[in-house]
Amino acid sequence: MKNYKPKDRLSAKEYIDGILNGDRVILSRGITIVESKLESDKILAKEIIQEILPFSGKSIRIGITGVPGVGKSTFIEAFGKHLITKGHKVGILSIDPSSQRSKGSILGDKTRMEELANLEDAYIRPSATGDTLGGVTNKTGETMLLCEAAGYDVILIETVGVGQSETAVHGMTDFFLLLMLSGAGDELQGIKKGIMEMADMVVINKADGDNIKKSEMARRQYQNALHIFPQSDSGWSPVVTTASAIKNIGIDTVWNEIEKYKTLVEKNGYFNKNRNNQQIKWMYNNINEELKQLFYGSKNIAKHLSNLEQEIVTSKISPVKAAQLIIEEFKQSFKNPAPN
Ligand code: GDP
């Protein structure tokens, strides 16, 4: 490819052709467009996504979560290499909700997944966090589509298991993997019940050396704990296994279980049903976000809202009436558009 400066833009066709040809440089630059806040880039991104859409989706999308230090990057390095030896192309997207605040991010650390990063069949990209959870879904979701169109048939989306981002990741993946440690209660590991409930598989990592016995005990405990949760619509019963990412033990079991899951849910129709529901939810989330933006972003509305707040606290108007008034005003603004 020509010697473009990073800021130069290609034509939509050049991005599309490059991505479909599996060109990693163009893929990276396409993802930059998807993540961009510039209006002109947003238009370009829509065009790229629209064209590559028919070539996306042919992958298994796996969400991976666990608290910092549990061994996510070590696990992904071992798991990714295992998948590549099986002939897969692996795309890895990392969401780090803390990176915006701290700037320097654990996931941005260059030494993470070093070996994997050097392999031709692995593509690793820290995903932008976005300002909102909706932003995370949009940017990571669209990045995932680009990776799929570029030929990556296993997508791993990694997130730190402490915040809301798991729900977003769960909402865009087919299989959700939770990494845990033995010898620490879930409270200690900061894992909420809701996250346990989303897991299709729990892997007790660092099951090596002195930790083997404890890990086996933890495995049994978690397996029992998971039985209390209601059966998922997928028809799959979550599995708990032990592994050592650093010693490469139990990694193949994880992939075998995911393949079993895939066979089950493709057969019983859940795979497609779940993806369709995710797509539809994605649309509604966007509508909700856009509507909120439209409403709260209007200067007139903002001014009247602060007046209404005063009227509410001085008991001049009821909250319900105030809400009706402002919505009515919002509707009127479409009939007689006034400058904002
Ligand atoms: P992350 O923050 O979840 O990405 O965790 P890392 O992959 O960076 O691992 C945190 C620390 O745990 C590092 O020092 C790793 O070497 C270590 N570690 C990761 N996996 C294993 C494992 O299977 N066994 C042992 N003993 N240590 C591990």
Image (cartoon, rainbow, N blue to C red):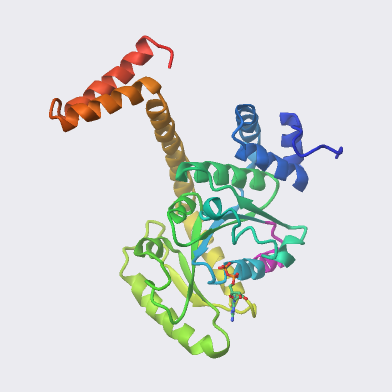
Q: In this view, does 130 lie to the left or right of 7?
A: left
Which residue is at the far top? Answer: 336
Q: Residue at x 61, y 57 (%)?
A: 104
Q: In the image, residue 55 lies at what x, y percent?
A: 65, 41
Q: Does the magenta stretch include residue 198?
A: no
Q: Is residue 23 visible?
A: no
> For the point 70% across and 57% down, which residue is it?
89
**Quadrant in which the N terminus is drawn:** top right
The answer to whether 313 appears left or right of 206 in the picture is left
- Residue 316's image quarter? top left
Relative horizontal placement of residue 329, taking residue 147 as reference (left or right): left
Give the percent coordinates (x, y) of residue 230: 31, 63
Q: Looking at this view, is 62 or 43 the one in front? A: 43
Name the residue: 41% across, 67% down.
Answer: 190
* Quarter-of-image position of residue 61: bottom right
Q: Is residue 96 above or below residue 86?
A: above
Q: What stretch is highlighted in magenta?
A: 80-90
Residue 43 image point, x, y percent: 61, 27
| Residue lying at 29% horizontally and 26% vertically, measured from the top left | 305
